[in-house]
Amino acid sequence: MKSSILIVDDDKTIREQLAEYLSNDYVTYTASNGHEAVRNINENSDIEIVLSDLKMPGMDGIELLKKIQDINRDIVTIFMTGYSTIESAVEAMRRGAYDYLTKPLDLDKLEITIKNAIDNKKLRAENIMLKERIREKYDSVEIIGHSNKIKEIMELIRRVSSTKATVLVLGESGTGKELVANVVHYNSLVADGPFIKVNCSALAEGVLESELFGHEKGAFTGALYMKKGRFELADGGTLFLDEIGDLPPSIQVKLLRFLQESEFERVGGTKTIKVDVRIISATNKNLEQLVAENKFRDDLFYRLKVVTIEVPPLRERQEDIPLLVDYLLKIFTETHHKQIKGIDPDAMKIIKSYNWPGNIRELKNCIESAVVMSIGDRITVESMTPYLTLKHRARVSSGKSPENLFEIEKNAILAAITKYGNNKVEAAKALGIGLTTLYRKLEQYGVE
């Protein structure tokens, strides 16, 4: 469908010639003055672009722009102006006009400007739609579980989301700290703003400082241009600092200053920049211990933990495992186009008996693997990952629950070989692994 353009000019010849020139690619409307243009916009809701003269009798371009914005802020306005009124055109852009063209018009430039304006409008619309979808996703999400600890977390998230308080999320690796940060942001006062994430342990100190605060051209070798940092990019939104416990001391100082004054300078710069950013940080480390060891600033620690949300490990919320498994099964069944209808009790027993040192991340990988490996329409013991099966059998045979995966496998394999009188073929079948794998494992254990 063609885009619609309204051409506004008090010169009849100009507006009719432009309408004819653009009519092959666009639906065109014309108006001889601002009042007629406003009437056109009210009567034709399909108008996307207004191409208007800036200097007109009665209602000038600036006043027309204000009227257009009052009617529909999605309409893109491009002004045509003589050299004597360029200053007014620049003022119009400050007020929200997309661009201006000088008379006499360069028709090639006119076409490019209109095309770019339409593309920009589509991108903005897609961006708004994407933000809405993301917001809906995290607005309705319930962190999966009905345990008391999860209920407490959800209540805390609801209370803190309506504020701009700094939040510290604590928990072991894989417990879902980033999900908590997402839910807090997309239910917050700055949900329509950007949500920028930085992993503080993934970058070297010098690179991390530039990533966070930006740098000026020539600040260091290779700084060929000015670069905005994550703090500037997150202006009006949230900055999520993951693995905050790995933040180098020099950057801890700059972060503390930002939390106190909401300002910073780019690397190599002297200009002070102020932004409005909410900070959410997360770590799997014991910050209190790091403070005691003088590895983390105590004043920064207290600034970060205005509100603390502790995400429990999976072993402390085992009653939530069946719900999580059901949720993950639905996701991966759809992702991998399988027809999985459920999980066998024996397979669920194995899952519930496991300690899950990798928490939800490990459970997620396990369920995806089981879905991919399943043959029928149910997850069975045979489709579970080998180490879970080995771990369960080791626990049943020994009555113990070794913490080390190496010991779990070793005990299970040796127990099976003993049970089957050193018949490795039968032992491998009972364990659900290949004979080659069995020999490789025995070699690892140093067993002849």
Image (cartoon, rainbow, N blue to C red):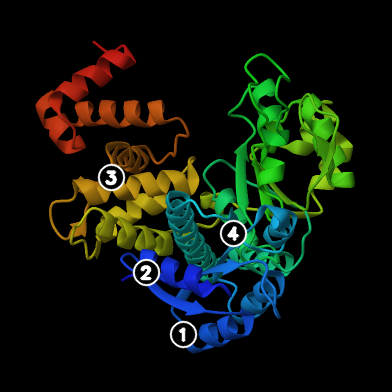
- The location of residue 76, given as percent across then percent down, is 55, 66
Query: Which numbered dot is residue 20?
Result: 2
How far apart marks 2 and 4 lie (CA) works out to 23 Å
- The location of residue 123, given as percent across then percent down, is 47, 58
The answer to which of marks 2 and 4 sits earlier in the sequence is: 2
Tag 4 residue: 98
Q: Tell me the quarter of the picture where residue 221 sits.
A: top right
How far apart marks 3 and 4 lie (CA) works out to 51 Å
The answer to which of marks 1 and 4 sits earlier in the sequence is: 1
Query: Which numbered dot is residue 369?
Result: 3
Tag nearer the camera, 2 or 1: 2
186 with respect to 125 (left or right): right
State the SS at label 4.
Answer: loop
Q: Tell me the quarter of the picture where residue 203 sits.
A: top right
Query: Which numbered dot is residue 435?
Result: none
State the SS at label 2.
Answer: helix
Indicate the amino acid at tag 3: Ser
Q: Quadrant of the N terminus?
A: bottom left
The answer to which of marks 3 and 4 sits earlier in the sequence is: 4
Taking depth in this image into account, of 142 and 146 the one nearest to the observer is 142
- The location of residue 334, given as percent across then percent down, is 26, 60
Q: Residues within 10 Å of mark 2 (few under 14, many from 20)?
A: few
The answer to which of marks 2 and 1 sits earlier in the sequence is: 2
Indicate the amino acid at tag 4: Tyr
